[in-house]
Image (tube, rainbow, N blue to C red):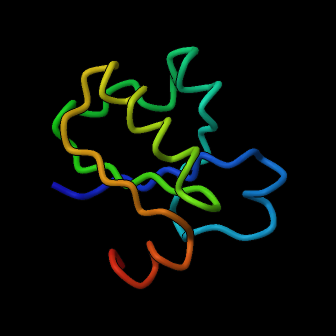
């Protein structure tokens, strides 16, 4: 099963640089149901990141509430690229 990487920063932040292949879904979109995740299995490994790890921590909680079970806080772009790619 391949992992899914989600950049939870705002679109203007995402536009300044992001992990290749990462979806841009800020926390407010996650709270609205994030249709980008339709069809994604609940046990898919998901790595979330932002700038400092704070928003990605919030996103982890939202994703857990949505039923996702394998979520990792990648902290930021550099950490994700170094640890998960």
Tell whether 47 sits left or right of 78. Answer: left
Tell whether 28 sits left or right of 36. Answer: right
The residue shown at (55%, 70%) is 20
* Image coordinates for residue 38, horizontal then vertical, percent: 39, 24
* Image coordinates for residue 75, horizontal then vertical, percent: 48, 63
Judge whether 11 appears above or below 75 on screen: above
* Image coordinates for residue 43, horizontal then vertical, percent: 16, 37
Tell whether 18 sits left or right of 59. Answer: right
Extreme-top residue of the structure: 32
> Quadrant of the image for the C terminus?
bottom left
Q: Give the number of marks.
A: 0
The residue shown at (77%, 47%) is 11
* Image coordinates for residue 18, horizontal then vertical, percent: 64, 67
Which of the pair 55/81 is nearer the observer?
A: 55
Judge whether 79 appears above or below 64 on screen: below
Which of the pair 44/79 is nearer the observer?
A: 79
Among the 4 quarters of the image, the one containing residue 73: bottom left
The residue shown at (21%, 30%) is 42
Judge whether 78 appears above or below 11 on screen: below
Extreme-bottom residue of the structure: 82
The residue shown at (39%, 30%) is 61
> Quadrant of the image for the N terminus?
bottom left
Which of the pair 14/41 is nearer the observer?
A: 14
């Amino acid at each position: 099963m391949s992992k899914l990487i989600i950049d939870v920063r705002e679109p203007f932040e995402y536009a300044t640089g992001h992990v290749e292949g990462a979806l841009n879904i800020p926390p407010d979109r996650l709270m609205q149901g994030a249709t980008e995740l339709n069809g994604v299995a609940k046990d898919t490994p998901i790595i979330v990141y932002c700038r400092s790890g704070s928003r990605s921590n919030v996103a982890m909680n939202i994703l857990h509430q949505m039923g996702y079970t394998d979520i990792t806080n990648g902290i930021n772009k550099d950490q994700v690229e170094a640890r998960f790619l």
